[in-house]
Image: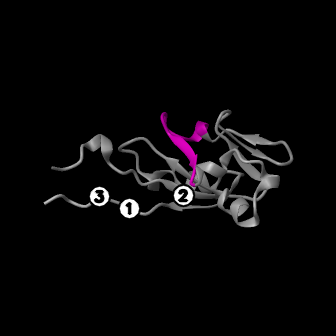
Amino acid sequence: MPAPKSAAIRVPVELKLKRNYKYDSHKRMFESGSGTSFDPHRDLPKDTRIVYKVPALADADESGLSKPERELRRYMQVILPPGVSPQDFVEIVRAWPSVEEASVGPDVSLPNAR
């Protein structure tokens, strides 16, 4: 039996934050260490989510993180609503002041049940 369409795995836009930036998921804003902020949602479709690839590090105090953990915290995903192509938004994400690099994530699928 095929998976329902609502369970489809969506291809995200993968991004790496510039050093000294973080994403505040409560405010839904990128913030720099110097105090500037940027609202990425003005450029995105409704119901888009921006998430850390390692959620356990998202709210951690940076002073308590190891160098590899601080590096891992720079990686995020922009998960677009169903039916929206990440190809249409990767250049927009690349242009954000908080982003060092961005690309379309891998196309992943569940195995077919036989």
Crowd band around label 2 with a 10 angstrom C-alpha radius: few (<14), some (14–19), many (20+): many
Amino acid type at mark 2 = Glu
C-alpha separation, residue under disc 3 versus residue under disc 1: 10 Å
Foreground: 22 or 57? 57
Residue found at the very far left of the displayed protein:
114
- Which quadrant of the rendered structure holds the C terminus? bottom left
Foreground: 47 or 53? 53
Whether label 2 touches label 3, CB < 8 Å: no
Classify residue 82 as left or right of residue 97: left
Q: Circle 2 is placed at which residue position? A: 14
Q: Circle 3 is placed at which residue position? A: 110
Amino acid type at mark 3 = Leu
Foreground: 84 or 110? 110
Q: Secondary structure at mark 3?
A: loop
Closer to the chain start, of discs 2 and 3, is 2
Kindly identify the residue that appears in the image at 71 percent across and 52 percent down. 98
Closer to the chain start, of discs 1 and 2, is 2
Crowd band around label 3 with a 10 angstrom C-alpha radius: few (<14), some (14–19), many (20+): few
Residue found at the very far front of the displayed protein:
64
Residue 73 in the image: x percent, y percent? 67, 56
Kindly identify the residue that appears in the image at 76 percent across and 41 percent down. 37
The magenta region covers 41-53
Classify residue 114 as left or right of residue 75: left
Amino acid type at mark 1 = Asp
Q: Circle 1 is placed at which residue position? A: 107
Q: Secondary structure at mark 2?
A: strand
Residue 95 in the image: x percent, y percent? 64, 54
